[in-house]
Image (cartoon, grey):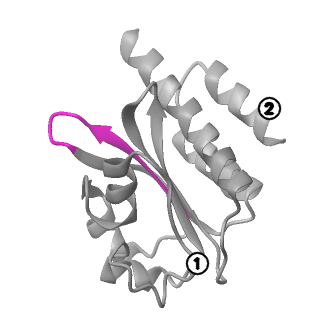
Amino acid sequence: MNTEDFIESIKNAPHADWQAWLEQTLSLFDCVTGTLHTLEPASDELELKAMQGIPDFLLPKMSRIPVGKGMAGIAAERKEAVQVCNLQTDESGVVRPGAKDTKVEGAITAPMLWQGKLFGTLGIAKKDPYEFTTEESEALMGIAAAMALHQLRSAAR
């Protein structure tokens, strides 16, 4: 399945299948690890809905993330994709110390946005250092936007 077909399948899905969507995203980008969080507006926190390749001991730290903290929180706050070429050596302050325990390197997190409104975040990572291209970043943003639209439609039902 290509990115465009995947985006259409998300938009037309009768119900959210966060785990399957995350796994398909990882496959499209040849990634091994990923997280998908939705925004809980009442608490302004991101709640983990799906994950792949995250060690169990990190789940308590990743289950709820405040907007503005870590890659997911910063992507949510800035409303733009945030990436690091090597999560293990990053010193930008974007990566939380516990994230290094995932043992991944090239990582990117995209906000799930629809018409400027935040619905969550979608993060993926590779085992090796990697700089995602502009095209890859835009494709991930498109997938994340389709997920946001699905959330908006679900809330309206």
Q: Residue furthest right?
A: 1
Residue under circle 2?
A: 5
Q: Position of residue 70 (x, y in %)?
A: 33, 67
Residue drawn where x is 54% and y is 63% of the image: 108
| Quadrant in which residue 6 is drawn | top right
| Quadrant in which residue 69 is drawn | bottom left
Residue under circle 1?
A: 85
Circle 1: residue type = Cys
Q: Residue furthest top?
A: 157
Q: Please, is residue 14 above or below residue 101 in the view? A: above
Q: Position of residue 154 (x, y in %)?
A: 44, 18
Q: How many marks?
A: 2
Circle 2: residue type = Asp
Residue 145's tag is: none
Mark 1 → mark 2, Cα distance in angstroms? 28 Å
Q: In this rendering, would 68 be left or right of 92?
A: left
